[in-house]
Image (cartoon, rainbow, N blue to C red):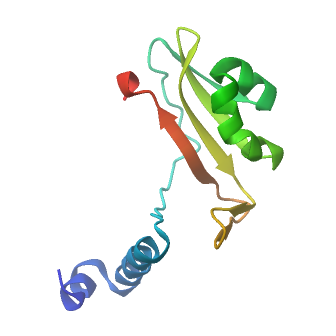
Amino acid sequence: MNLGESIRQLGLVLTLQNLVARATLRIFGLEICLIALDAGRDHDPIEGYDMEMVDGPRFRVLAGDEVFANHSASFAKGDQCVVTLFDGAVVGYNFYSNGSTPVNDYITFDVPPDHLYSYGAYTHPEHR
């Protein structure tokens, strides 16, 4: 789709957001997306799975030393972690920040207080 078609179909603002996201991906190797969630809506858990907000020591016990070592900086800066458990074993996790978050040596995201930056997500292949 060329620029004119994109503006007609998506509008100017979404077209510009798309261009910025694609340029960011090309320049820095990052992909950025915005997902709006309905925080007020309850969701039924999937049978057999449990989710738990964990701190560093609990994550280390659940996920093991090697996995913890890869994420210890996230806990050190106060980010939050949610693990997904199946039969007591970690089958997924995700980290969240709502403050200043270094992404790499060149980029830091400053996340507004009413938003979350989600990163470091993992789901075991058998549970995708």
Name the side, left or right, on which 42 lies relative to 25.
right
Q: Quadrant of the C terminus?
A: top left
Judge by depth and name the residue closer to the eye, 65 or 10. 65
Question: Residue 121: where, in percent of width, then height?
Answer: 53, 41
Position above or below: 80 against 104:
above
Name the residue located 73 percent from the left edge and 18 percent from the top edge. Answer: 61
Residue 86: give x, y in percent of width and height. 51, 14
Split into 4 quadrants, where in the image is the N terminus? bottom left
Q: x, y (%) of residue 42?
A: 54, 32
Vertically, is 78 above or below 112?
above
Query: Residue sitting at 61 percent across and 28 percent down?
Result: 83
Q: Residue furthest bottom?
A: 4
The residue under the point 22% across, 79% down is: 9
Q: Return the residue nearer the eye: 26 or 53.
A: 26
Location of residue 109 by image quarter: bottom right
* 3 relative to 15 in the view: left or right: left
Occupied quadrant, residue 6: bottom left
Q: Residue at the spot x=66%, y=22% of the render? A: 64
User: Which is more toward the observer, 11 or 79?
Assistant: 79
